[in-house]
Image (cartoon, grey):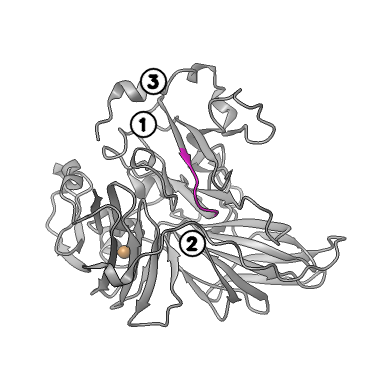
């Protein structure tokens, strides 16, 4: 893979015509065929927002919003996003969960050169799967995601589903104090444990908002964990809710139950039967209220539970012919690092190797090489006391089983590996390239818990 500065600069053509303060323009609806070179012009730029009442917080926004502008595409179509960097530092965009070519994957130096301040880059790819996805940088992730560079990407089914109503709920906590001022995004003693948590919890950038939902309808709630650190213990006491999709893929609809653990990077889609007018349901993280869902008169006739969502065209791994590989996720405890000389902490490792975020040559030493077209079973062993949402780029995988819980096999892009858990996942290595395989607790990923897997 060679990406030249010339290719990047070629992406700059026409940027001078863009309005600087325009944020992310949406050309999606009513776009005359062929009249535009992209569907979205997504500007990343600093923005002052009010997270704490009466206080200003200087966040980094996509399209004038933090979390960022919701991007939408239709399954099977091309999505064309012109990313314009108006941040004070280089950035890229990774499209979490989208199966796409490596050159569009947003990993710096592997997929592309970082997009420098003032530059732009055109992302163009097909979206093969319908579902709830998201986007974020893969550069200086602790600070860039921490400051707000996270956004939903919704891929709609080609045919109408049984849902007439839907809402996107982006969960994120912020590393701010009571005055709305950012503190440290990463503290070494926390990075070596569960990750550095933010203190202010929000839904769609608002602390404990009230969301109005149409009474009597079954609403599709797309709940996205866009947080750096937190695993949410999601629950909806008193609600009639069914799970329709996990991460990017549909499942057989089933009751939500007592709670669902939604790790960083993970998504869940619920069908919620909205109760009678005036009812207020709490959406909670454990005992803490995240949002209030209030039912309002819709004037529509009551709806029934929609049928299951159609499966995505993810290839089915051949388990009988699959090759097995084992990955151990361990604590590394390399505390003696000279940060002044550009060193990075290495608290975590995969199969004895800690990724160094400052060493561009890490990607040249893949932890495994898969033969294109073959099926593989990965045995994921967490031999640490902290949970790790394990994410693979480029390909979806099927969760087969676990020694800690009963699994109904399902396709995903991120699996929350509990403490001391061993789980097996399977995939068809159908996408050539070098793909990042990492924990989505950003502190863990930046202190070693990342590797490259090559498919050739
Ligand atoms: Cu982790």
Q: Residue 303 is drawn in which quadrant?
A: bottom right
Q: Which comes sooner in the sequence, label 1 or label 3?
A: 3
Query: Which residue appears at 49% of the width and 61% of the height?
Result: 247
Indicate yes or no: mark 1 CB to ligand 1 under 8 Å. no
State whether residue 344 is above or below residue 229: above
Quadrant of picture, ligand 1: bottom left
Whether residues under marks 1 and 3 lie with C-beta atoms below 8 angstroms apart, the answer is: no
Q: Compare marks 3 and 2 and give the one earlier in the sequence.
A: 3
Which of the two discs, 1 and 2, labels the residue nearer the N terminus? 1
Q: Residue at x 69, y 66 (%)?
A: 293
Position above or below: 364 against 281: above
Camera-side residue of 367 and 338: 367
Quarter of the figure with the N terminus: top left
- Name the residue beneath numbered marker 2: 247
Residue 264: % across, % down: 42, 61
Distance, label 3 to label 2, CA atoms, is 35 Å
Work out whether residue 195 or residue 108 is closer to the camera in this orientation and state it: 108
Label at residue 115: 1
Q: Is residue 2 above or below residue 164?
A: above
* Alpha carbons under labels 1 and 2: distance apart: 28 Å
Q: What kind of element bears circle 2?
A: loop
Question: What residue is shown with label 3?
Answer: 10
Q: Magenta residues? A: 125-130
Residue 410 % position (x, y): 45, 69
| Mark 1 element type | loop
Few, some or many C-alpha atoms within 10 Å of disc 3 (few <14, some 14-19, many ≥20)? few
Looking at the image, residue 140 sits to the left or right of residue 118; the answer is left
């Amino acid at each position: 893979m060679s990406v030249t500065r010339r290719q990047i600069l070629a992406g700059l053509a026409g940027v001078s015509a863009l309005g600087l303060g325009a944020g992310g323009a949406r050309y999606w609806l009513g776009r005359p065929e062929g009249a535009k070179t992209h569907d979205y012009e997504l500007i990343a730029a600093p923005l002052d927002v009010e997270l704490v009442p009466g206080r200003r917080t200087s966040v980094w926004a996509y399209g004038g919003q933090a979390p960022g502008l919701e991007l939408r595409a239709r399954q099977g179509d091309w999505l064309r996003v012109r990313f314009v960097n108006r941040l004070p530092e280089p950035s890229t965009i990774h499209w979490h969960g989208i199966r796409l070519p490596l050159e569009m994957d947003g990993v710096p130096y592997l997929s592309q050169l970082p997009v420098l301040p003032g530059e732009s880059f055109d992302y163009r790819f097909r979206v093969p799967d319908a579902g709830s996805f998201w986007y974020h940088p893969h550069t200086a992730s602790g600070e860039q995601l921490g400051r707000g560079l996270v956004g939903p990407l919704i891929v709609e089914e080609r045919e109408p589903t049984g849902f007439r109503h839907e809402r996107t709920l982006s969960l994120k906590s912020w590393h701010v104090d009571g005055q709305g001022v950012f503190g440290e995004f990463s503290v070494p003693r926390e990075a070596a444990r569960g990750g550095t948590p933010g203190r202010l919890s929000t839904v769609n950038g608002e602390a404990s908002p009230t969301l109005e939902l149409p009474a009597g309808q079954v609403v599709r709630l797309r709940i996205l964990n866009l947080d750096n650190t937190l695993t949410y213990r999601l629950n909806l006491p008193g609600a009639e809710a069914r799970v329709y999709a996990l991460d990017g893929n549909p499942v057989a609809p089933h009751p939500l139950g007592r709670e669902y653990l939604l790790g960083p990077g993970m998504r869940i889609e619920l069908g919620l039967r909205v109760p009678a007018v005036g009812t207020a349901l709490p959406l909670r993280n454990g005992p803490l209220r995240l949002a209030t869902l209030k039912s309002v008169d819709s004037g529509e006739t009551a709806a029934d539970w929609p049928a299951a969502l159609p499966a995505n065209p993810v290839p089915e791994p051949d388990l009988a012919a699959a090759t097995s590989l084992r990955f151990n996720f361990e604590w590394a405890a390399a505390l003696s690092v000279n940060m002044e000389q550009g060193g990075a902490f290495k608290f975590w490792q995969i199969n004895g190797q800690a990724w160094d975020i400052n060493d561009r040559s890490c990607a040249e030493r893949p932890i495994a090489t898969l033969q294109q077209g073959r099926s593989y079973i990965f045995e994921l062993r967490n031999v640490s006391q902290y949970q790790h949402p394990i994410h693979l780029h480029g390909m979806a995988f099927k969760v087969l089983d676990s020694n800690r819980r009963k699994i109904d096999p399902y396709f995903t892009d991120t699996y929350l590996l509990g403490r001391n858990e061993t789980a097996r996942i399977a995939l068809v290595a159908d996408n050539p390239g070098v793909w990042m395989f990492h924990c989505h607790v950003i502190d863990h990923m930046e202190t070693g818990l990342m590797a490259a897997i090559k498919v050739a």
